[in-house]
Amino acid sequence: MNDAVQPDSIHPRLEEAMRLPRIAIESTEPVVDGGRFAAKAIIGHPINVTSKIFTDGHDKLAAAICWRQKGETEWRRCRLEPLSNDSWVGHFTPTQVASHEFCVQAWWDLYETYRNELSKKHAAGVPVSVELEEGRRHLDAAVQRADGQTRAVIEDALRRFGSAHLDDERVSVLLSEEVAAAMEAADPREHCSQSEVFPVEVERPLAQFASWYELFPRSETDNPERHGTFRDVIKRLPQIRDMGFDVLYFPPIHPIGRKNRKGRNNTLTPGPQDVGSPYAIGSEEGGHDAIHPQLGTHEDFRELVRAAAEHGLEIALDFAIQCSPDHPWLKEHPGWFSWRPDGTIKYAENPPKKYQDIVNVDFYAEDAMPGLWIALRDVIWHWVEQGVKIFRVDNPHTKPLPFWEWLIADIRERDPDVMFLSEAFTRPAMMARLGKVGFNQSYTYFTWRNTKAELTEYLTQLNQPPLRDCYRPNFFVNTPDINPFFLQTSGRAGFLIRAALATMGSGLWGMYSGFELCESAAIPGKEEYLDSEKYEIRPRDYRAPGNIVAEIAQLNRIRRQNPALQTHLGFQAYTCWNDNILYFGKRTPDLSNFILVAINLDPHHAQEGHFELPLWEFGLPDDTATQGEDLMNGHRWTWYGKTQWTRLEPWHLPFGIWRLSPPHRA
């Protein structure tokens, strides 16, 4: 028990109670951790706000969303509309990539309460002479508060009310929609209550919808003895564009240390020609703001960024906060590291993995605060100045959360278009927290979700709060570090299955080069690639037989053409009577774009089964005829009724993607 002074009571005293609001505003969304962190949103997309709002008695309420960009003084307002059971809903649409904030206000709607009572009594034939006088007084009071067109409407209503000879005429004036709208504008908002102010981070569309392609620039060569360059990557850009990718991501492009350099297949005995792991950052040629000399110069890199943009691609760089023993910081800033008594630094480990070629910085070393923090921020800003707006961050969960919260906010205050992808395969709470402190996207557990039950549970979880509002999943199908067991034994069909799951399940997905060639050779018993590209140059023939380039291009084309597939939200699992077939829908909120996806999760056998068309989502009876379109091949047909049948063959195409068009939307 601490010695802090405790309040006498949690209950209000009389004077306090008389000042407390009569209207309750509860359970407002989207709100992350009570407003401690910002909910995520996308520019130009409506932000749906819901809240529970209620008061004592039977008076009518009105409510509104008040919102603005942080730093603005004026609030914009959007009405909330009542649903059932005290639920209210509304939305506002931000038009700037920036930090925003919103709150909910609610008040007694005096005139609507009056209109409700008057209409009921008049309809029941009850004399309303007293109520009519109350209405006149409402108008009389409102005209004093109103101006402009609102005042003119109320003044006209008073004139018509005064000249009317019959009660029915007076009632008609008081109940008219025009008068109701004017009285709403002039409402004194009695007993007005306001929620807390909640933050929202509005980001650019690429934060929610993008297809990532990862490659090692040094492998863009036709000869393993010749180091690839940025100019070689430029030659490859049209192929990557034609597959439908938006983001081209590179592992670290910096000088690689020589001390403890790794050889092929992660050996500790490299030969003189071994190129080492790019994650062993830093040598006498420079550190995190330098470029490996065999890749090219800063001008070569800027030319690559420009060329990529001409092809509709953005370059993403790896931000790995680690150093080879040769990194200049060890000599220039020894106080940024934790030294052992014998004068050495312990190399990095993630048991059972060992990284003898890198050492870690110490964020909380006395000499590191704030110098190291600022230096790392400046590294990011250096690459922003070279034209990079996207950073994939290596293992952010092993670095301090306060550091990330500060760094990301600092960078985005300078340039709100900058985005960060978290590569954190760790505990769920930590992964979510990284999203809360500012990471725009995150790698996920998708890689290890294989069964129908696992995938359904995971995709559903991502669509629910709190993850829905703070965590954007990027479904990478493989990485240089992860050669999934499923792909090691599933052949070409398995690669198609995982590609369909990733592209249809989330607005964000990614693949590491070689996936389109169905590369799967593994170190026995491990989810690691044999002859890993992390330790050697790996030229590839991207037109090799058996590739799935065309299928990947079509999947990306389908995503671009269908808004329902441009987010992980809108997922709904539906019934298919076969546990080997994952069947789900993705739809836009207004149901104008409705996609159905059926995926055979068995890469070795054909699977078939009956499934349900979700006609109930459109309010249609079970015997309705609907239009279907196969988005992989363009075939069209008519479905009759709710129950249908499919067969999915892995040697042909192990999935179906269909656009459903009900009669009124055909």
Image (cartoon, grey):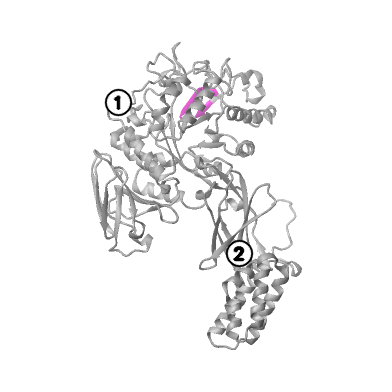
Above/below status of 7 relative to 139? above
**Residue in view at x 30 percent, y 57 percent:** 626
Disc 1 crowd rating (10 Å Cα; few below 14, some 14-19, many 20+) is: few
Residue 327, how many percent across, how many down? 58, 19
Read off the residue under disc 1: 544
In the image, is residue 356 part of the stretch drawn in magenta?
A: yes
Q: What range of the chain is rendered magenta?
A: 348-358
> Which amino acid type corresponds to the residue marked 1 in the rendered image?
Ala
**Figure quadrant of residue 53:** bottom right
Instruction: Judge left or right: residue 371 versus residue 487.
Output: right
Q: Where residue 583 appears, x then y in whole percent?
A: 33, 50
Give the spatial CA distance, label 1 vs label 2.
Answer: 62 Å
- Answer yes or no: is residue 59 visible: no
Asked if the stretch drawn in magenta spans residue 578, the answer is no
Residue 365 got which mark?
none
Query: What is the crowding at mark 2: few (fewer than 14 residues within 10 Å), some, or many (at least 20)?
Result: many
Q: Secondary structure at mark 2?
A: strand
2 or 606, which lies in front? 606
Report the residue marked by disc 2. 63
From what the image shows, is residue 617 above or below residue 506? below
| Residue located 38% across and 39% down the image | 556
| Residue type, mark 2 in image | Ala
**300 shown above or below 135:** above
| Residue that protrudes farthest toward the top in the picture | 272
